[in-house]
């Protein structure tokens, strides 16, 4: 899941670079639409990274970290639900990216 957010971030960076290089050849409306989609997706990535940060475990040796890990294990059923939500967010972001790429290719 962590790699997926990194990959999406890189994809958006490449999409922006491609958009900038093609800006002269595309109508302003298309450029604005793609930029809005990129901005929306980047916001989704930030929300996703925030959720992932909440799920990330603290593997330290301090007593507080160990207690935190035990508490997270106690909430395991909720983590599965959270992972399903995160998966949905990633899927939506990929769909938005696919749409933005298809707009650029037309």
Image: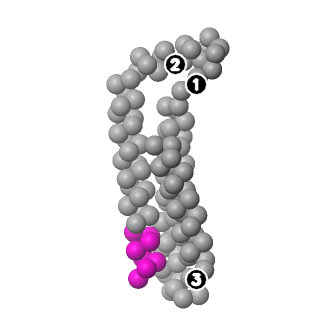
Q: Is residue 47 visible?
A: no
Q: Which stretch is magenta?
A: 99-106
SS class of the residue under badge 2? Answer: helix
- Viewer-nearest of labels 3 and 2? 2
- Reading the image, the residue beneath label 1 is 58
Image location (x, y in percent) of residue 69: 52, 19
Would residue 103 be counted in the magenta stretch?
yes
Q: Quadrant of residue 101?
A: bottom left
Would residue 12 be counted in the magenta stretch?
no
Q: Magenta: predominant secondary structure element?
A: helix
Image position of 92 with respect to 51: above or below:
below
- Reading the image, the residue beneath label 2 is 69
SS class of the residue under badge 3? Answer: helix
Image position of 51 (left or right of 24): left
- Reading the image, the residue beneath label 3 is 23
Report how far apart the C-alphas of labels 1 and 2 lie in the structure. Answer: 7 Å
Labels 1 and 2 touching (C-beta < 8 A): yes
Residue at the location (54% across, 40% down)? Answer: 50
Image location (x, y in percent) of residue 7: 51, 54
């Amino acid at each position: 899941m962590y790699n997926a957010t990194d990959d999406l971030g890189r994809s958006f960076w490449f999409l922006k670079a491609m958009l900038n290089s093609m800006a002269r050849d595309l109508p302003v409306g298309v450029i604005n639409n793609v930029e809005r989609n990129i901005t929306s997706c980047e916001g989704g990535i930030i929300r996703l990274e925030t959720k992932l940060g909440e799920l990330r475990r603290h593997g330290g040796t301090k007593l507080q970290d160990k207690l935190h890990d035990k508490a997270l294990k106690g909430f395991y059923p909720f983590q599965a639900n959270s992972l399903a939500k995160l998966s949905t967010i990633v899927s939506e972001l990929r769909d938005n990216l696919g749409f933005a790429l298809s707009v650029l290719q037309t």
